[in-house]
Structures are given as structure tokens and as C-alpha cells.
Amino acid sequence: MIEIKNVTMDFIGKAVGEPRKILRALEDISIRIPDGCVYGFLGSNGAGKSTLMRLMCGVYRTQSGSITIDGSEVWDNPEAKANIFFVNDETVQYSDFTLEALAKYFASYYDNFSFETFHRLIGTLGLPNDRKMGTFSKGMKRQSVVAAALSCGTKYIVMDEAFDGLDPAMRKMLKDIIVDEMIDRNATLIVSSHNVAEINELCDRAMLLHQGKLVFDDEIDNIRSGVSKVQVARRSGPVTKEEFEGLGLSVLQYSVMGSVVQTVVKGVGEEITQKLEGLSADFVEMVPLTLEEVFIYELEARGYGYESLAEN
Amino acid sequence: MAMSRWRRINRFALGEARTHARLFVVLNITLGTGCLLQMFQGLTSGLYRSNISFIGLGLLLAGGMVGPTVVIGVFRELHNRQQSDVVYSLPMSTSERYLSRLLALAYLHILPVLAWSGLAAITTFIRTSFFNEYEHIRRYIVIDWASTDAIVRTWTGFLACVLFFDAIAVVSAVCCGRRAEIRYFTYLIAASFSLAPLLLRMQLMERIGGQVTKPSSLFYSWTLSLIAWDRADSKTWQFVLLAVLNCLISVGVMLLMYFMYRRRDASTAGKPVVSRAFFEIALVAGLLAYYTLLISEPGLIPYILIGGVVYLVIHIVTFRGNLSVPKVLLWTVKLAATTAAFVLLLWIAYVTDGFGAVRYLPMKNLDNTNIFIDASYDFYDGQNTVAFAGPDAYYWEYHRTDWVSFHAQPTNDRQIRATAEVFQKYAAQRDKSFSGFLKFFQKHEETYRGWNRIVMCTMEIWEGEDHNLLVRQEVSLTGQQIREMMSELKKMGIVQIR
């Protein structure tokens, strides 16, 4: 299990000629990533997803709090790092490698590297073994790195926006290969993406970061059922936002069209229905939300979205 | 445990070195060609021609000096964000990662340089010792020890310089986060660290203090200035010892940089300069070396402006915020303060006669010592007929109307010190005002026109006619002062005035 406890990360201008201001990238983040799951990192641009992934892989030093892999602190700990592989959002660093050289490179660092798995995967993907990766398409480079990652035999693979920029067919193929390999080994995949539908489809659990703070962290089903869209109609006049809040509901979004009110509130369906009985409304309808809608409403509630921009 | 750790580091180093295979091949072709040219020098040009292939040695030198390129490649996680993501996430501890980088540097650069230059040295030794003397081979084997000395000096000196350059490149790599900064700071530091101590000593002690002694070997113990030691009056074993010390210090510096390396993580990659102390030290050392070089010739002093411009440009290039007038003004003030500090240092050296260097005489018995005195006179002074002679009449007169040189031979340590005291007394009488200070730097090179000078050399007599210079003292005085000084020496029986 990967355990992140009270992690705060500040980027401080320490280098020469750098303004000495502090940029807080992460603030008091605590999550647990259980073994054997596919975990999704969601967040707005610049929310801190990549920073958190780098901290988890020992690329950045933890400033406060702790990050442990199976109980061992990850920073400067080769034993802990031998269990995790980081696929970052770029592939340009491998341009000078042929696939054979790439395999040898990782094999010299990871004791469990399997050439058999690597050759099987690149055979499946139809990747040329003797060409430099600099001549590959973006999709081929991604596939190559993913093949290397899966061949290292680590218990955890962290992928930062690994599928971004790939066509739908390529995404599906890559996801299928990853999931098959991970299931076979009961390994854990941690993936970040801007494509919420993809996280919804791929992951068992997810968390949402916004401006360095954790918004939620739960199983996907719980996340979706924890927020509901409600349509309420009342002849005597629309239900106000204050009335919803007076019932103890946390309102993320509220809009009125005549006497019909559409609102997004936090809470489980039955609990909300019970509370809404006190409104003496003529019509109440609960509409299920997708993860993407949850993402949008949660961020809008925190001032991130087109309406907030327009207001400002 | 230690063995398995060493195996891990070696495995990581080989893994890293494999990723630079192309550089390794190019480097070995360059070094190998240089070695072959040197090895077979003479076969094409004739056995009795030069023993040195300049193209061959040039190629070996070029291969030796690509250290910064290799260091930049090996320490790529420090300046490339994408690489740092990969390298820092690999299962290595910081110390393993650092040592594997140094080992990769050894595999890619240091060992090939050592091997090819060593092969060139050995084959040159064999060729110059045997085949160039092939007439003698029929009778007996002659080893040309003079050539051997030169080969050993050249080889060890070359290796010391290569390691010094690599060490400075490692220092720059660990303290900078961008490729360009690593490269130009390496050249800046290597040049200024090599030049500044020697040039400063030359200006402050020798020129201002008027005292020339052989610099301590400490001045050559860890810089490219080791090459200068080769020209000094050193024995081969002394040179080799110093070269080995130089190499050891370079290796020590590389290992010590671990303590800076371990403070970094991937967040510093891509930032021009990571260590503020490194930045300031490098620039101050650069300015010191440059200014000291310029003041040696009054005509060069206006070029101080170029140093100032480079100083500001480096600040602008490394600055990552928005440029503003106050920022540039601040850097200009810093530059002015550094320049003022340098002038102050010169001024202090001037008023203290080279920090008291003028009073220097070795703390040992000087009975077996001679003094040679040269007096240069103002051409227009009208006193150009004066000549001096030592008490034993053992003197030279060069028949120049404006210059006499003679050899005084006091009999014992007491007389030598008494002579030196007179010299020092007059040396301390020079104009200590600020205008005198400025005049000193304006007129230094005009020794033979409108300037009077006395040079006194204290020479230790070795076996036969071999002399060892202990102190060379030089002072510029007025014609009147020179005449007074000579009268005083005459009264003491040190010199005679004809």
C-alpha cells in the first residue's frame, strides 16, 4: 500500500536569480492507495497531480509529511523505489535509445526486469526493435515506455497523463495491455489524466485535487453517488438556495428556470430524498451524475469554471 | 555488503555509460588516432627528426579536454527535467547514483585518456630510448633519461590537467541546473582558479612588494597552473609528486561535491545556477583573474569595461524573474563594490610594501650566498657614468651608460641581512600617496626610460656554478635615492663606487 500522510510541498525560489516567493503546490494531502487497484488522479491544470506523483516516486524530496510504500519511506530509498515505476508525461528523453538499449538500460536498474515480457509486449504492439525511438511516432514511444514499465516487474506503476495525445484506438489498445498485465500480477496502477471519462472507465478509486488541496478521495461509485442533481418544481414559487441549505444540504450548483429549480447537492440519494420531503414541492426528480459532472461541479463550487471567470 | 554495493554501483555506472556509446566511440577514435600519430612519429619524417607529433598530441589534448561534455552527459538528471524524472525515480540511493555517475565518467573519459596517453608515453619512451639511438643498439642499450624525464613530466602533467578540468566540470554540474551554465562556468572557473592565485601573487608580492621568490608549490598544487611548474626549476620527482597530488585533490573535490549533490532533487533541474555561493565565488574569482591580468599592462586597463559587461550579461542570463532597472542597478553596484574591493586590495598591498614582502629573507643561514645588484638609471638623469663594484673586485660592467650590474660578495649571513635592510629601507621610502599609487601602475613598464630601478638578487650557491635564487628584490627609486643607497652600501664595504 502507498500511504501519503499530511504531505505539503512548496516550491521556493532558491536558485540564483529566482524570485524568492513560495509557490504552494500541495497542502496537507493524505490518501491511501490500496494494493491491486487502479487509482485515478483527477484535478484542474496545475492542481498538483504531477507533483504528487513525483513525490510518490522519489523524484522530489518530501518537505513535510511522509510518503511510504509498503511501510518504507520512498525518498532516497532504493528498496522502496524498486517497487515503483514512473512513466512521466514526456518521451523525448528516450529519443537516442533503440528498444533493445531501452530494455538494457532499465534492466541494469531493476533486478526483476523481464526481457521475455518486454519482447512479448513489443511483439504484440508491433514495435521495431532496431530503430531509434527518436524516429517513432508519439504513440509508438508511449507504447515502448509502457512496455518497459510493465517489464520492470514493479508492484506499482505510476503514469502521468500517459494516454494524452493518443488516438482512441491506440488508447484502448494500450489500456487493455496495461490492465491485462496488471491483473495478472495483482499490481497497482496509478494514473492521471484530464480525460475524466477515461478515469471513470479505468479506475476503481480516484481522488480530486484542486489548487494543491484534496477535494475527495474515494471509490468511483461512492464519488458518483455522493453527489446528486435534483430537479424540484413548486407552484408557489421556486425553492431558494437558502431553503436547500436550511435542510442541511450542501449545494454545489443552483439554477432557476421559472418555477423549476435545478441544483447539485452533496449526499446520498435516499438521504436527499428524505430531506427534500420538507419542501412540499410538486415535483422532485433525482438525476444520476457522471464522474465528469462531479468533477465539473466540485471545481465550479471552488470558483474554477467559466461562470466564475465571467463573474471576475 | 560492501561488495554487493560496489557491484550495484558498477552495474548502474555501466548502464549509464552504455547510453553514451556514441560519445565513447568518437572519443576513443580521437585519442587512438592521436596516440598512433605520436607512436609512429619519425617513421615518416625520419628517425632523427622531432620526437613530438604535434597533431597527435593535439588530438590527445582535445580528447582530454572534452571532460565538460562527458560530465554534462553523465549528470543529465541535473539539467534536464525529463531525464531527472526518469533518473531520480530509479531504485538507487543518492550516494549510489552519485558514485555511479563518477564511475561512468571514469569509464567514458578518464580511463580512455589514461590508457591512450599512457600508451603514447610508453611507446615514445621506447622509440626515443632505443630506436633513435639505433647506432648504439648494436653495442649496448642506451636509455635516454633526458627524454624519459620530459615524457614523464608531460604525461603526469597532462593527466593532472585532465582530472582538474573534469573536477571543475563536476563542480559546475552539481551547482548549475542548465547545460549552458555548466559549460561556461567550467571554463570560467578553470581559467580564473588557475590564473588568479599566481597573478595576484605576482602583482601584490612581486611587483608591489618588489620581492621575487620561487612560489610555494601550493600555488600549483591544484589548478591548470601545474603546467607553469614544469617551467620552474623543479626536479622530475618533485613535478610528478605535485602532479599526483593535483590528481588526488581533483578526485577529492569530485567526491566532496556529493555533499552538494545530495541537497538537490529534480525540482532544481533546468534552473541556471542552483548554488548562490558558487555563483558569487565564480564571478569574483573571474573578475579577480581578469583585473589582475589587466593591471599588468597600463594600456589594458580600459578593457575592464569588457569584464563589467560580461559580469552583467551573466547576471541577466541567469536571472529568471522580470528584468527591472533596480535589479540591473543592484548588479552594477555589486560589480562596482567588487572592483572597489580589488583596488583597495592593491592599495593596501602598495602601502604595506606587498604585505611586508619587501622585508622577506629566508629564515636560514645565508653564509653560502651571493648578492647581485643591477642598477638602472634614468637616461636623462646625467648620472650615467657611475658604476659599482664588489669588494673583491668580482664584477661585471656591461658598458652601458644607463645600466650597471655588479656582483657584491658579502662574506657572511650578517652582511647579507645588513645589505637587505638597507635595500628595504630605501624600498619603503617610495611615495605612498594615492597619486604615487596611481603613478606606480601607470609607469611600471617604462623601466628604462625616465625610471630608476634597483634589482637585488640573493643567490644560494649550489655545487659548482649552480645557483639557486632565494630572493629577487626590485624597487623603483629616484636617482638621488639610488645614489644615497649606494653611498651607504659603500660605507658598509659592500660595494665600491668608481
Image (spheres, coloured by chain):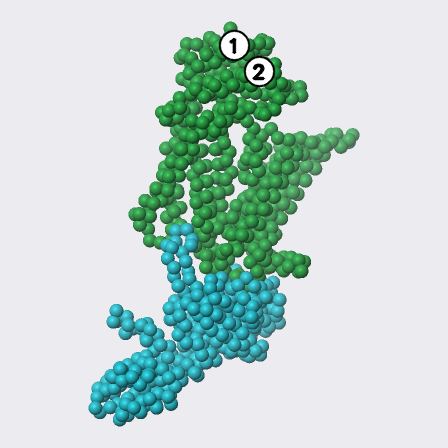
**x and y percentages locating residue B180 in the rendered image:** 45, 50
Quadrant containing the C terminus of chain A is bottom left
- Horizontally, residue B201 falls left or right of residue B409, namely left
Chain appearing in cyan on the rendered image: A
Q: Secondary structure at mark 1?
A: helix
- The residue at 45%/33% (across/down) is B293
Look at discs 1 and 2 and give the one toward the viewer.
2
Q: CA distance from mark 1 to mark 2?
A: 13 Å
What is the chain letter for disc 1?
B
Q: Which residue is mark 2?
A: B415
| A119 and B166: which is toward the camera | B166
Amino acid type of the residue tagged 2 in the rendering: Gln
Residue B97, placed above or below residue A211: above
Amino acid type of the residue tagged 1 in the rendering: Lys
Q: Which residue is mark 1?
A: B490
Badge 1 crowding class, 10 Å Cα cut-off, few under 14, some 14 to 19, many 20 or more, is some
**x and y percentages locating residue B89 in the rendered image:** 53, 64
Quadrant containing the N terminus of chain A is bottom right
Q: Is residue A188 visible?
A: yes
- The residue at 37%/33% (across/down) is B302
Q: Toward which corner of the image does residue B298 lie, by quadrant?
A: top left
Badge 2 crowding class, 10 Å Cα cut-off, few under 14, some 14 to 19, many 20 or more, is some
